[in-house]
Amino acid sequence: MNKSQISWTDTTWSPVTGCTKVSQGCKHCYAEREVTQRWSKNPKSIWYGRAFTDVRCHPEKLEEPLRTKKPKKIFVCPRGDLFHENVPDDFIDSVFGVMWSCLYLRRNCIDGHVFQILTKRPERMQKYLSTNRSETWARHAVHYGGGFEPDGIYDQVLYQSSEPHPRIWLGVSVEDQQIANERIPLLLKTPAALRFISAEPLLGAIDLLCLDDYGLKPKWRNEPGTYNVLEGRWIAAVNDPDFENSSVETDLTKLDWLIVGGESGKNARPMHPEWVRSLRDQCVSTGVPFFFKQWGEWAPNCLCDTKYHHKTIERPPSGLPPPYNRGVMFRCGTKRAGRTLDGVIHDAFPEIAL
Ligand code: SF4
């Protein structure tokens, strides 16, 4: 496993590498860029002479989290997608087996790991996790546990994995409202103890307080409504007389963490500051932890020494109501642009309820 530069994790684990594009957020995929520009030319790399679209599973990497001495936040498959259509269910079973093994093998403190799984393929994630796989995971957990505590691990995983583990976090990437409308409902329907979204690269305004129904309506309600995915609250469009004027359902499934970031790289698209502020404000008003990862290539103001001459670009339309003006963005580069939003660094994490 490698120490990660990504600020919301400690380390990365790559049992699957390679991917194919699924939406606008993938257009300038950073992993593809790194592979094409650097690693595919390095004879020592697993990417040597290989296209990014060549999706491979790496059984030889499966045991890496079990060998770590300290508990870590582990980002699973940063250069691929665990739920890519070319990854067989059997292999995903092995990955989950290793995670469960770590969470119940009390060796080297690895039961303190947190696994962060982020996908752009929530349909498959939902389908996979909606079937009972406890027995398969328990078998894999014993296998990868190296025969250590075999009976204890088998029973623990068999019985405990019928409920999602609070240290296995599931997330989806979203870049604009349309994609949020498509992917977030699938995430909310997936069994998980902790759900998050990564809005990076953020390419448009997103309202999470008022998602149109998109199949999120509680089963027992007939009328249309909207869903506040940060509070787990559904609000009926009109009062239904059958429900004695109660137009709100509370304590429904919700998001537990939000990560936001702009795009990096040569062809990066600018992120309107109002899109970020709006998501920050939505999190503040609902108490959901907000993590601002970076501005990306384009900063809202020139953030560096005036000796640099910056290219500017007109801000994209904010998509938010007036009076937000359009203004310009400055090409400061990811490092100089930094990760301060209105003078504050936002790096909140969710609390783990064990
Ligand atoms: S899903 Fe992620 S890794 Fe795959 S192409 Fe899109 S951005 Fe790249």
Image: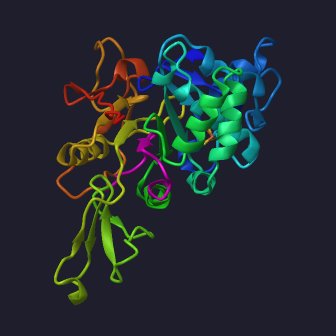
Q: In this view, does 14 lie to the left or right of 297?
A: right
Q: Nearer the viewer, residue 132 or 117?
A: 132
Pinpoint residue 76: horizontal percent, then vertical percent: 58, 31
Q: What stretch is highlighted in magenta?
A: 187-207
Pinpoint residue 335: horizontal percent, then vertical percent: 41, 18
Q: Is residue 235 left or right of residue 6?
A: left
Answer yes or no: is residue 93 visible: yes
Pinpoint residue 206: horizontal percent, then vertical percent: 35, 53
Q: Which residue lies furthest to the front in this view?
A: 151
Q: Does the magenta stretch include residue 336?
A: no
User: As displayed, is residue 347 above or below residue 214?
Assistant: above
Q: Is residue 199 magenta?
A: yes
Q: Which residue is drawn at 57% across and 25% down?
A: 102
Pick the quarter of the image with the C terminus: top left
Q: Which residue is drawn at 29% across and 40% down?
A: 273
Indicate the quadrant where residue 15 lies. top right
Q: Nearer the viewer, residue 311 or 116?
A: 116
Pinpoint residue 286: horizontal percent, then vertical percent: 21, 48
Q: Which of 272 and 70 is in front in this view?
A: 70
Q: Which residue is drawn at 43% across and 38% down?
A: 166
Q: Is residue 327 left or right of residue 204?
A: left
Pick the quarter of the image with the N terminus: top right
Q: Quadrant of ligand 1?
A: top right
Indicate the quadrant where residue 126 lies. bottom right
Q: Which of 154 and 54 is in front in this view?
A: 154
